[in-house]
Image (tube, grey):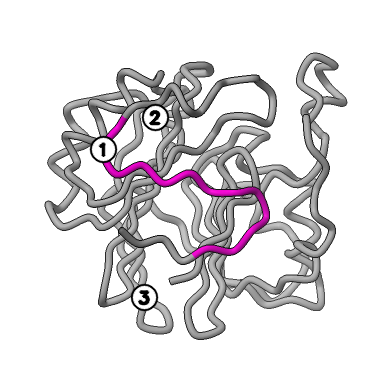
């Protein structure tokens, strides 16, 4: 599985040409509303040439479901499977195009092209927020979405997660570095990948101390492994 970090919580997974895009925020919509939140690095325009097969929106916050970004991929000439919780589903299913909108909540599983997607609980200010586990038959990748550390989450997570992708900025009902490190240790994944930092803040990623950390580089495709 090849992985590209799109900034903030945005991720692109690709296997054998099958593309999965999660929570892309590729505009400056938030900065237009709040000048203190202008993005701190430009978007790589090549991203807009990508044609995702599956798009996943974990919750209805602008840096995760951004209408200005969504319309770049969900238009009348595209056909995308869109997985989203109720708060996003109510909005995104009105986009033009031949899209398959799948309403998911914790416990929902959707399988496509040999990849199983399982929605899990996230503890966030959007009460319908989810995390997602991608199982490609070889490895399981757990993207927590925006979440706080909550004991109820762990009963939904298997003990064979290969990599966990989690927020560390400690703002907006997200885990701070201490809680994120504890969360990663509790999950027991082989690899921990911090996300949801750097776009609006100056968080020094080197201070996030956790076993087997891999730091992604913006807009650079990687195949993470130990």
Residue 20 % position (x, y): 54, 67
State the residue in front, 30 or 138.
138
State the residue in front, 126 or 35.
35
- How crowded is the residue under tag 3: few (<14 C-alpha within 10 Å), some, or many (20+)? some
What is the C-alpha distance between the residues marked 2 and 3?
A: 24 Å
Residue 221 % position (x, y): 59, 64
| Residue at image coords 12%, 52% | 159
| Residue at image coords 78%, 30% | 40
| Left or right: where 11 falls relative to 130 | right
State the residue in front, 66 or 214.
214
Residue 27 % position (x, y): 81, 42
What is the C-alpha distance between the residues marked 3 and 1?
A: 27 Å
- How crowded is the residue under tag 1: few (<14 C-alpha within 10 Å), some, or many (20+)? some
Where are the magenta residues, as a range? 210-222
Please give the label number shown on residue 115. 3
Q: Which residue is mark 2?
A: 147
For marks 3 and 1, the one nearer the N-term is: 3
Q: Quadrant of residue 37?
A: top right
Q: Secondary structure at mark 3?
A: strand
What is the C-alpha distance between the residues marked 1 and 2?
A: 20 Å
């Amino acid at each position: 599985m090849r992985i590209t970090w799109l900034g903030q919580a945005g991720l692109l997974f690709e296997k054998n040409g099958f593309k999965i895009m999660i929570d892309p925020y590729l505009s400056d919509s938030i900065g237009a509303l709040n000048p203190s939140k202008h993005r701190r690095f430009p978007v790589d325009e090549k991203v807009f040439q990508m044609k995702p097969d599956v798009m996943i929106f974990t919750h209805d916050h602008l840096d995760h479901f951004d209408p200005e970004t969504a319309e770049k991929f969900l238009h009348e000439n595209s056909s995308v499977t869109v997985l989203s919780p109720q708060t996003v589903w109510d909005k995104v299913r009105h986009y033009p195009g031949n899209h398959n909108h799948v309403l998911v909540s914790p416990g929902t599983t959707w399988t496509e092209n040999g990849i199983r997607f399982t929605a899990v609980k996230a503890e966030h200010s959007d009460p319908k927020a989810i995390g997602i586990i991608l199982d490609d038959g070889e490895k399981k990748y757990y993207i927590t979405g925006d979440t706080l550390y909550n004991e109820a989450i762990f009963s939904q997570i298997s003990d064979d997660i290969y990599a966990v992708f989690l927020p560390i900025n400690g703002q907006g009902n997200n885990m701070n570095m201490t809680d994120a490190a504890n969360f990663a240790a509790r999950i027991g994944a082989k690899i921990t990948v911090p996300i949801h930092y750097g776009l609006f803040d100056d968080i020094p990623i080197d201070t996030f101390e956790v076993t087997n950390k891999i730091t992604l580089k913006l807009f650079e495709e990687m195949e993470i492994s130990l």
